Image: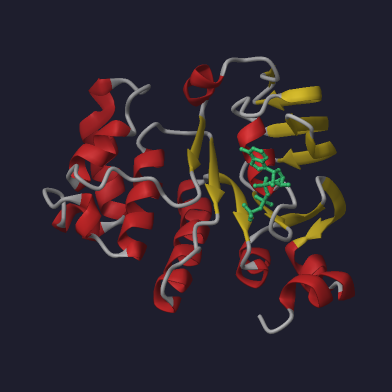
Amino acid sequence: MMLHMEGVHAHYGHIHALRGVDVTVQVGEIVTLIGANGAGKSTLMMSLFGKPGASSGRIVFDGEDITRVPSHLISRRGIAIVPEGRRIFPRMTVMENLLMGTAFADPANFNADIKRVYAMFPILEQRASQRAGTLSGGEQQMLAIGRALMSRPKLLLLDEPSLGLAPIYIKRIFQIIRELNTEHGMTVLLVEQNAHHALRVAHRGYVLQHGEIVLAGTGQELLASEEVRAAYLEGG
Ligand code: ATP
């Protein structure tokens, strides 16, 4: 088991954003969280980093209880996040952005790691010395994913990777997620508004509503579920 969240509650002041969620991610799985705006998807991901921390419940990652581990130590344990909105450094070059992803990794691995990222995203090698802010939205998302991979994570968290991208890039990003999993064995937890794409790529999914898991199943089961279709797939 890669990740096991057990009865996790989290608050922002008086807002009770997670209400006892149970989520598991097995090694080698793609798991997706779907749900409406404000359902708690980002909060669930960020709770792994203690932002906000779990007010009760337990989070076990790779066999160790990380519920109270300070957020700056979580990356070193092997969890990397590609945050919503990508948050690349626009004035830095593409290569400098990738370098930022190695902050906690062994610098001796830099050359091998950057080669791996360039092999996966040749466009980043072509643009290595270009300022990241000049990349298209889709390229910036690839850069954000590449940067996260530089720390050699065991678990990759992707928060709304398709948000705001042109349709051609949306397709490409989901292809990349699938390739990361099948060719590189990456375990992925994916938050998406784009439920249709997410459930097609995921082995399993959870539906979050008002901070609670209301439905869980395989990607196929959730795609076929009347409840999911009505609430999240209409028009999609
Ligand atoms: P979205 O797709 O809009 O990001 P989400 O499912 O990721 O939605 P969260 O961002 O996790 O939802 O929000 C869950 C709840 O917590 C919402 O009620 C939201 O308003 C609240 N919330 C989120 N971030 C904060 C914050 N920094 N301070 C206070 N309340 C917050």
Pick the front one: 89 or 102: 89
Tell me which residue sits at (84%, 49%) in the image. 213
Q: Looking at the rendering, in which quadrant would you find the C terminus?
A: bottom right
Tell me which residue sits at (68%, 65%) in the image. 199
User: Is 34 on the left or on the right of 189, as rendered?
Assistant: right
Residue 200, horizontal then vertical, whole percent? 65, 69
Res 1 seen here:
no
Residue 182, horizontal then vertical, whole percent? 52, 55
Residue 188, horizontal then vertical, whole percent? 58, 47
Outermost residue on the bottom side: it is 235
Pick the front one: 189 or 235: 235
User: Is 66 on the left or on the right of 206, as rendered?
Assistant: left
Tell me which residue sits at (66%, 29%) in the image. 52
Q: Quadrant of residue 71?
A: top right
| Colouring scheme applied when the structure was drawn | secondary structure
Pick the front one: 102 or 49: 49
Residue 74, horizontal then vertical, whole percent? 54, 23
Outermost residue on the left side: it is 129
